[in-house]
Amino acid sequence: MNDWWKKATVYEIYPRSFKDTNNDGIGDIQGIIEKLDYLENLGIDLLWVTPMYVSPQHDNGYDISDYYAIDPLYGTMEDFDRLIQEAKKRNIYLMMDMVLNHTSIEHKWFKESRKSKDNPYRDYYFWKDLKPDGSAPNNWTSRFGGSAWKYDEKTEQAYLHLFDETQADLNWENENVRNECYKILDFWAKKGIKGFRLDVVNLLSKTPGLPDDPVLGPTGDGRTHNVDGPKIHEYLHAMNQEVFKSMQLVTVGEMSSSTPEQCLLYSQEEREELSMIFSFHHMKSDYKGKAKWTNEPFSLEKLKASQSLFQEKMHKGKGWNALFYSNHDQPRALSRFADDRMYRQESAKLLAITLFGQQGTTFIYQGEEIGMTNAYFSSIDDYKDTESLAAYEELIASGFSEREALIILQQKSRDNARTPMQWDNSIYKGFSTREPWLRINPDEISAEKEMSDENSVFYTYQRLIAYRKKYPIFTEGSYRALDAENKELFIYERLYNEEKLLIISNFSNKNIHYKMPADYREPHRINILESNYGRENLSATLELKPYESLLLFRE
Ligand code: TEU
Ligand code: CA
């Protein structure tokens, strides 16, 4: 089967925080190799490792200064080649994270580009005059706050950066840029990797002339001119034809704030663009409108509405979702959408079941499989992430007290997900033998503990991964939301020929009575595939416990 990856589970590694073997406090490639047996045991098929290319690390590797070399922080190219080989022995394949929207300002192209207006590399990036009143060339804002333009004295023009000012946007209108990018993709593909995760790839095409956005920046209403731009499908199709197709690569595009319609186009097989997409609409279930840096409580209704919309749309239109609740840019899902104190294990399993029952390729972010929680740092000195630090400054500038700003960071900072992986209960949790680059979460959770408990979160994931391979209904079945209005329960059905799956998840800390749909009232016909309370019997009316979740299969 050509689309084996539809049944696959991908494990995301944030290498900095995975496993340190030379004890400099930073995870490394050797550390990933050491943990391959653990990953094989979990049952994963693909490893997505976030960028390990040479980088000044202003955005932990998403600011690349040399695409063809491994950063010494992580090891050598020999280590990387060994990782590919060792993974392959365990039937695990690599998916590289590739950043083609921007480079570090320390990349040689940018260094050239900056030198003069007639430098051959000038047009690799977006350079513009300031407005006559000295303001930025347009009203676009950086995803990390402030204007998206940085003035450079050398040539008295500004360059575009949709992220940090050390990450300059590449000009994809320039054919040389496109060819250079194909070369980079080709170089890594030839090493024997199986695919790419393409960073912010929906931003590659900008509306020509870079006009002002209708309402200020990507946080306002109306579409910005730098998402899903006019040539984006042309670029992705060309990339597919140049590189992905002949090498049969699996690709996932990061599509933050792309419309559902666009997501469908990106992932429809016959269009030959990408295999699947990450959409982020459900990640905004605790945003205030489009604003992230608030204390807005989580809304299950929003989560359900956006997931159901994508499930139905992608199924009908034959697109493909990449399913995730966590990644290195998001706080820990169980802290965010459930209860990480009173019901930590139940919550972790509830999220696993609710996600893995859906249609798409499943993704696990390191630590999710052992139920890691937010770190809740209470001092600004503990935060390292450039986005979080910028947000903190902005909150303070707009009148929040330091304490109020910290409470928001505790909920929303990306550093919550970036604390070192907890392998055992030794002082540095088996991650390193010295103080790591980012503080460790002091709780008791560890992989070792999870492995020794047959009722752990780890084994729930292990079984879910296996079900998705065993039963075609997970990949093929249609999706139907039940009880869509319910504010506490997330219930949906999957249908495939005569088979059915029913997922029932109680996202509240209350006991709730739930009347089973008619088709599920003959208990002997129903197989309880998963229950996070070890439930063995069903009845016409269930009394669901706090954060209880069930995965039922009717043959
Ligand atoms: O993320 C893009 C992205 O959409 C997020 O940065 C998002 O805007 C933010 O985290 C949520 O508030 C990708 C990478 O995953 C991220 O780590 C990088 O910082 C970013 O691109 C720039 O390369
Ligand atoms: Ca190290």
Image (cartoon, helix red, strand yellow):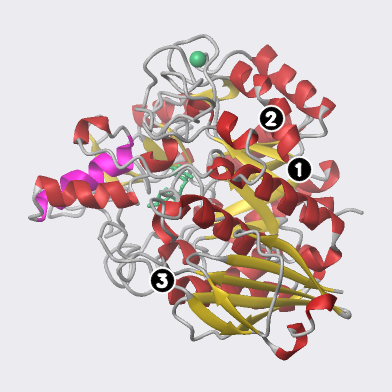
Looking at the image, do the residues carrying marks 1 and 2 touch, with CB atoms under 8 Å apart? no
Lower sequence index among marks 2 and 3 = 2
Q: Nearer the viewer, residue 391 or 90?
A: 90
Residue 146 visible, this angle: no
Question: What's the CA distance linking mark 1 and mark 2?
Answer: 32 Å
**Which residue is located at x 12 percent, y 55 percent?**
133
Q: Position of residue 378 (x, y in %)?
A: 22, 39
The residue where tag 3 is placed is 223
Q: Callout 1: 10 Å neighbours few (<14), some, many (20+)?
A: some
**Which residue is located at x 64 percent, y 33 percent?**
452
Q: Nearer the viewer, mark 1 or mark 2?
A: 2
Question: What's the CA distance linking mark 1 and mark 3?
Answer: 30 Å
Q: Please identify the quarter of the rendering in which residue 63 is found.
A: top left
Image height of 72 relative to 58, above or below: above
> Which numbered circle lies on residue 38?
2
Q: Residue furthest top?
A: 22
> Magenta residues?
385-398
Q: Nearer the viewer, residue 452 or 404?
A: 452
Type of amino acid under label 3: Arg
Check disc 3 and report its element: helix, strand or loop: loop
Lower sequence index among marks 1 and 3 = 3
Q: Position of residue 309 (x, y in %)?
A: 58, 77
Check disc 2 and report its element: helix, strand or loop: helix
Q: Nearer the viewer, residue 542 or 290?
A: 542
Q: Is residue 306 left or right of residue 416?
A: right
Q: Is residue 97 left or right of residue 58?
A: right
Check disc 1 and report its element: helix, strand or loop: helix
The residue where tag 1 is placed is 243
Q: Give the dominant element type of the magenta stretch: helix, strand or loop.
A: helix
Q: Position of residue 404 (x, y in %)?
A: 14, 52
